[in-house]
């Protein structure tokens, strides 16, 4: 498994973009914990992540390239817009109604009309912005196991099935706070 650090990632973004465009599955750091991801428009790679994690039906969230992506593809009311402007980038996942279903693969959110969107306060967001595509973001663990805070914690099953990892040392976070704007009343969930 190839491991890239922040500097290597910045020096060769074209290689990273090429690999992700070809269906790579990878582990990467965020402002909270390590995630496992792929191009959120690649059906086959998304299905592979589902198999790796043992998570067949639950929806995935995405890291998006910009706030503009959110406004173009999601239903954003005034309250949600003020949270987006104030809190992103940051350790939040905002649940919004998806209005452009062509913006992501149907396998990201099977059988629902809402999407969790993130813009982490971390250099991984710069990578996503340069790629200009949404990436799957889900904790880099087997469903039901402890989330990962360093590459040394990576489950052997995950390690065996990813193409590369982006490294940022040990992270001291916890999963992002979920703010659900898809209903009339805002719901906040700590994890």
Image: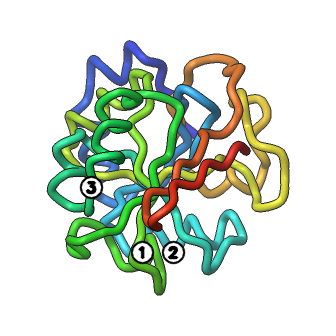
Asked whether the residues under the numbered discs 2 and 1 touch, taking CB atoms below 8 Å apart as contact, a structural biologist would say: yes
**Figure colour scheme:** rainbow
> Residue 110 placed where, x, y %?
48, 81
Q: Residue 157 falls in which quadrant of the image?
A: bottom right
Q: Residue furthest right?
A: 145
Q: Quadrant of the N terminus?
A: top right
- According to the image, label 3 marks what residue? 76
- According to the image, label 1 marks what residue? 44
Q: First in sequence, mark 2 or 3: give its number.
A: 2
Q: Quadrant of the C terminus?
A: top right
The alpha-carbon separation of the residues under discs 2 and 1 comes to 5 Å
**Which residue is rendered at x = 26% and y = 61% of the image?**
74
Q: Secondary structure at mark 3?
A: loop
Give the camera-side residue of 165 and 69.
Answer: 69
Considering only vertical position in the picture, is 134 above or below 176?
A: below
Q: Secondary structure at mark 2?
A: helix
Considering only vertical position in the picture, is 13 above or below 100?
A: above
> Residue 131 placed where, x, y %?
22, 41
> Residue 143 placed where, x, y %?
76, 61
- Residue 47 is tagged as 2
Q: Residue furthest top?
A: 7
Give the camera-side residue of 162 and 39.
Answer: 39
Q: Is residue 65 left or right of residue 178?
A: left
**Which residue is rendered at x = 26% and y = 48% of the image?**
78
Considering only vertical position in the picture, is 186 above or below 4?
A: below
């Amino acid at each position: 498994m190839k491991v890239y650090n922040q500097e290597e990632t910045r020096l060769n973004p074209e290689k990273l973009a090429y690999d992700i465009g070809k269906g790579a599955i990878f582990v990467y750091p965020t402002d909270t914990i390590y995630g496992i991801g792929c191009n959120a428009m690649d059906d086959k790679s998304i299905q592979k992540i589902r198999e790796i994690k043992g998570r067949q039906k639950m929806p995935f969230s995405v890291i998006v390239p910009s706030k503009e992506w959110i406004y173009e593809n999601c239903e954003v009311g005034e309250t949600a817009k003020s949270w987006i402007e104030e809190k992103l980038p940051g350790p939040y996942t905002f649940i919004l109604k998806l209005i452009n279903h062509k913006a992501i693969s149907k396998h990201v959110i099977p059988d629902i009309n809402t999407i969790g969107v993130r813009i982490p306060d971390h250099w991984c967001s710069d990578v996503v912005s340069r790629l200009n595509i949404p990436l799957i973001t889900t904790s880099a663990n087997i469903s039901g196991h402890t989330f990962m805070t360093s590459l040394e914690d990576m489950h052997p099953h995950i390690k065996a099935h990813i193409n590369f990892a982006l490294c940022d040392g040990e992270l001291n976070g916890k999963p992002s706070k979920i703010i659900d704007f898809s209903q009339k009343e805002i719901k906040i969930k700590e994890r």
